[in-house]
Image: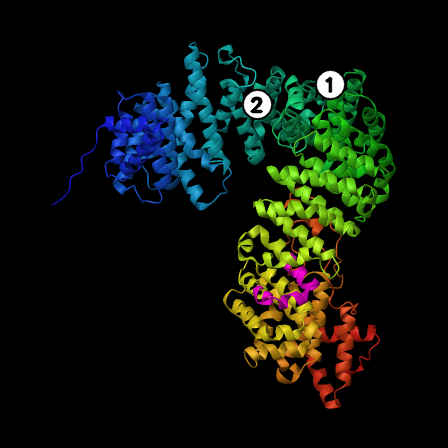
Amino acid sequence: MQNTITEPNLGYLTTLIQNTMTYEASVRIKAEQDLKELEKQPYYVSLLLRYIADGTMRSEHRLMVTVLLKNLVKKDWDVNLILRPEDKELIKKGCVDLLFSASDTKIQDVLSEIITIISEFDFYKNWTSLLPYLVNQLRTNSSNFETVRGVLFTCHSIFKKYREQSKTDEIEDELIYIMKEFADPMFHTFQGFISSLSQITNPNDLKLIFTCINLLLEIFYSLNWVDIPEYFEEHVAEYSSMFNTILNYDNPALDNNLIEEPGLLDEAKRLVCQSINLYLEKYDEIFIPYVEIFATSVWQLLSKLDSKMKYDAVVSKAIEFLTLVSRSEKHAIFKNALAPICDNIIIPNISLREEDEIIFAEEPIEYIRRDIEGSDTESRRRSAQELIKCLSIYYEKDIADNFLQKIHSLLQNNDWKSRDAAIFLLTCISVKASIQRKGATVVSQYVGVMNFLSTQIVPQLQASSHPIIQADAIKFICTFRQHLPKDSFPVIFPLTIQLLYSYEPVVQTYAAWCIERLLVVRDENDKPRFTQQDVLPFAEQLLQGLFHALDNTEENEYIMKAIMRSTAALKEQMKPIMPAYISKITEVLGQVCKNPNNPKFNHYLFESYATVIRFNRDYISEFEASLFPPFQTILTSGIEEFTPYVFQLISQLLSIRQPPLPQAYLGLFPNFLSANLWESEGNVPGLVAYVATFITKAPQELAKNNQLQQVLGIFQTLVMSKTKDYHGFRILDSLISTVPYEQLSMYMVEIFKVLFTRLQKKKTGQFVRCLIIFFSNFVVKYGAKALLQTINQIQQGIFPSLAKVVWESSLKSISGRIEKKVCAVALAQILFHTDLIQTSVDTWKMLLDELVAFLEGVDKAEEEEEVFVDDDETVLHTERSMAGGYKVTFTKLSFAAMGIEDPVKEVQNSKQYLAQSLSSFVSQLDPQQVQFVRSLILSNPTTAKRLYEYLQSNGFNPSFLQ
């Protein structure tokens, strides 16, 4: 017998909706559960659509039901756990019908959202009726502005997905379909609205018309983003005329009389500028004939708009258009207008407003974010700056001459706002090229930047200038830091330090930012321009000033970064102020442990610890005494943000401790082998560093409590992971380098089996590179014969095929000076210290050819670089990838990275070592064997030539190769 399900009445749904809004938890939870159950019923979609359509229901309840439908579509349309095919068809038809029958615009907008969500999956091929239906509504209801608005809003929601898209066959197909159905009615609708502007007198109708015009402009931009459709190309003259009409149209009825919020007409003009910018940038050949007309209109528009915030967006877009013109083939229209451009466009739009002063004083973080970090990419100032830059492409000298006169005039005004504009203007005309990491890299030859620095900037630092001018002066120094002569440092640096005591957080932050950036300036030889000796005379006042500023701001990352950089610059010269430094920075750590909410600040804090530890090893006991208590708090309290840093710093401290190790480290080791600590991805680099360092410092401890087996278990887990295998190799390398072979021998075959299993099942380039380095470390520690014997224990005679898979494919990809040398030495020992030439001639020859080719690629040995943390982003993500083989150090704290131990220090030159090994090998052969080796080498002329050169240049007899 078939069960029948009765659809509940609409009142039941009303009750559920009301109950979901009650403050009584039990009632609310019950209603939410009932709604979830109702969602599973076959009539659910029908019920929702009936409710939305019922005009007798309260509007807010109908809106909530519409949102319920939207959420259902959003979560299930492409999953099909709830919605059946018939439900989907019902929703499509119901939403489109309701879109034009619902009088509430909020409900209409949610229905448009639903249609947009469905369109992401079904438009157009699985919903061919949608666009024709919308077009029909547009044609038959052209005088019903509300209906037109609904159609255009829906179309805009669907079409905006084409912005930022690349051209593909699928996208092109969709756009062709859209243009075929929609282009003509869109054009005539647009034309109708523009022609009606002179006739409409009702303000409400006018506002509704401009709401529709703005939607049409949005649609125009979306449909032209990927490529210009043929229809728009054919109608570019008509659209240009309509756009120009909008730019020149004014009507007080459309002014909303607000200061910050743009009106409908302001938005329309912005959208026009957005579209003509797109055309000039992407379709200039088509649009060039209209550029001069629009340049005139845009110029007139800019001359009418005052400094109110409501006009910021349209002004920025309008200036962007002039910028695009200035670098186009029509740039000559500005040649004789540079002075008016400066007076009428640049100066009004770079002048500080009252709102800017308020942000400076009351929202310092926002001011810094806009000014230093460049978040105001579409601000008036940024737009004006870009216009000056582009005008200078063709008229650099003319720009300099005109603008320098204006700058001189501004400076004569003797008020701080004029001086602010003058400094900004001079910066704009001076900078020809810049990068964030270095500031200005190329400056104009027509502007005396250093003269301006000495006559206008430094005096502002010395005087009690307005705080904004002080910030401007600091920013000027920072911008042109790459061009500062070394002898300017004793003047500029103490003045900047003094501003750390400013009462304005922005000035304090700028001063710290400038200090930090000055300390990373490098000369062409990549050496610091301002050295330890330059900073040393100011060391005490520098750190005192930075900590004072830190006390007066809340977790300021710029100040913390400056502290880090200062300690890095001072290196071992921190000793006179070390006690105070340790005390203060530990106090800061204690504060942030309570609420670690600024990741950058926290990183620079721990990096500051790493820096001072790195260069002041004599203070190891003091570091341990101050750090271990807060570290214990972090670990026991489970402050997950900080535990990776703790492991890294403890590892760094351990690395500079000389045996015998204190009990504190010995007690930590078994705890750090606990499996739960290794579950967190962020902990692994620091834990690996600690375990590896501990093994090298106290290998004898592994014999206690089965710790060697635990370590090997960790190695196995890591090495089987594609993302963590290099960490496993680091542990293995530390075992090989320090643990006696007798202690490891019983595990060696199993270790090799694990490696071969991973090689066979999940081979990656990274793993193979790591494997080569491990084999090489094994050889230089235990000998080449031991390697081949261990491999043969896995499977007799497997080495030739292994060599082909490992060395032949990846030797050339090894990077790192020490790694390359170890690999070269180990391979030479395999070739000349084993019987490989007897057991596999082809393998011997292949490895020799690979070794010679490898050595030719390392003529310029890579030098180990000094840790130089410079980039603002990479400093937070400094764990090195394994693109070139695994390194001995893997750490997120750059200054905690310790040097790589060289296991073949006695070898100075890999080519010399190969020549010596070959010469010694040949000297032990009889004449017949020599001839055999000679024939093998000569079979590859390149190898023979290089080996001859190696032998001859290093004093060995190469005659056997002649």
Quarter of image, res 854: bottom right
Residue 333: where, in percent of width, then height? 67, 25
What's the amino acid at mark 1?
Lys
- The quadrant in which residue 443 appears is top right
Please tell me which residue lies in front, 92 or 343: 92
Where 200 sits versus 182, above or below?
Answer: above
Q: Residue furthest toward the top?
A: 201
Report the front residue among 793 and 620.
620
Residue 369 appears in the rendering: yes
Q: Earlier in the sequence, mark 2 or mark 1?
A: 2
Q: How many marks?
A: 2
Residue 388: give x, y in percent of width and height: 70, 28
Q: Indicate whether residue 697 is drawn in magenta.
A: yes
- Disc 2: which residue: 314
* Left or right of 230 on screen, residue 418: right
Q: Nearer the viewer, residue 783 or 823?
A: 783
Q: Which residues are drawn in magenta? A: 689-710
- Above-or-below relation of 766 to 208: below
The secondary structure that most of the magenta stretch takes on is: helix
- Judging depth in this view, the residue of 94 and 910 nearest the camera is 910
Residue 523 visible to an observer of this rendering: no
Q: CA distance from mark 2 to mark 1?
A: 24 Å
What mark, if any, has residue 417 been given in the picture? 1
Badge 1 local density, few (<14 within 10 Å), some, or many (20+)? Answer: some
User: Compared to 236, does 760 lie above or below?
Assistant: below
Q: From the viewer's perspective, is residue 545 above or below residue 699? A: above
- Element at label 1: helix
Q: Residue at x 54, y 68 (%)?
A: 759
Amino acid type at image mark 2:
Val
